[in-house]
Image (cartoon, rainbow, N blue to C red):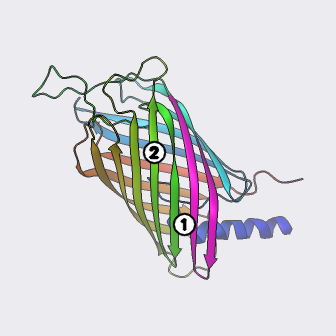
Amino acid sequence: MRSIIVLFFTCFAFTVQAQELYVSAEPASNMPANSLGLRLTNKFFKMEHENRTGFRFEPEVMFGINRNLMLHFTGYMANAMQENVRFEGGSVYAKYRFFSQDEPHSHFRMAAYVKGSVIDNPFEPKVDPEHSDETVYANRELDLEGMASGVSGGIIATKLVHKLAVSGTLGYNRFLNNIKTNLPDGFSENMLNYSLSFGYLTLPITYKSYEQTNMNLYVEFLGKANMDQGRGNYIDVAPAIQFIFNSTTRLDLAYRWEVSGNMVRNMPNSFTVRMEHNIFNAFKRK
């Protein structure tokens, strides 16, 4: 009976905070303690400079260590750097919630995160058709999700009021050499990343059971800015719709595109499909 009660309230907490389960960014809130999450993410994009469609597949395992700490382990497989699909590497992500303020129908969270990626991909400078002899650009986009090895860290703040959740992120990325390829001279090694995310719970209108299907609508603004070299930057917008079934399984659909910027990018637009399943109370305490 005690286990059933604990599971019910864990699922209830997962449901009422559903509008914080952003698709493109992480909230300051964590997974429930002793929980296990399995996530499969597919990102599809048109390769702007190669006239073909690419995709990146990201299997992910997530652990809720306790109420304040969670870990993610992610792998990357893609055809972004070549026409055939290959394993690109992996990353480890840790998030620690250090501040919580709870009120009726609202709360405020703050968390710190760190991430490390090890990637086995070549660095491919873009060629500007008008300057074909210039093969390296300091304002070329890099990321830690399959393109470049490196580390990152930052702060997340999330505010929930009734059915609306707003979250902001400010982080720093340091790019390093890939397994077989060194970071070319002239590429920016230091980058800021930032995001502003909004989530709204649309269904159910009246909460009656954790078995009800939840539907959430999101819009997220995501940006990066090089801190050295070319000073490239961009801002993307990413609207999304999300369904949560039985408070344990979610389906995300999102489209992302650039609204402003001067950074050289081969994948400025992308479509994301994600499935995630959470197992609560997966690690029982003796």
Is 77 drawn above or below residue 214 in the view shown?
above
Task: Categorize mark 2 by other alpha carbons within 10 Å: few (<14), some (14-19), many (20+).
Answer: many
Q: CA distance from mark 2 to mark 1?
A: 27 Å
Residue projecting furthest to the left: 130
Is 138 drawn above or below residue 203 in the view shown?
above
The structure residue drawn at horizontal position 54% and vertical position 63%, both measured from the top left corner, is 244
Asked whether residue 94 is drawn in magenta, I would say: yes
Residue projecting furthest to the front: 228
Which residue is identified by label 1? 18
Tag 2 near tag 1, CB within 8 Å = no
Horizontally, residue 59 falls left or right of residue 264, namely right
Which residue is identified by label 2? 172
Residue 55 visible in this rendered orientation of the protein: yes
Q: Which residues are magenta?
A: 93-118
- Residue 65, image x and y in percent? 72, 51
| Amino acid found under the numbered disc labelled 1 | Ala
Horizontally, residue 150 falls left or right of residue 249, namely left
Q: Under tag 1, what secondary structure? A: helix
Horizontally, residue 171 falls left or right of residue 213, namely left
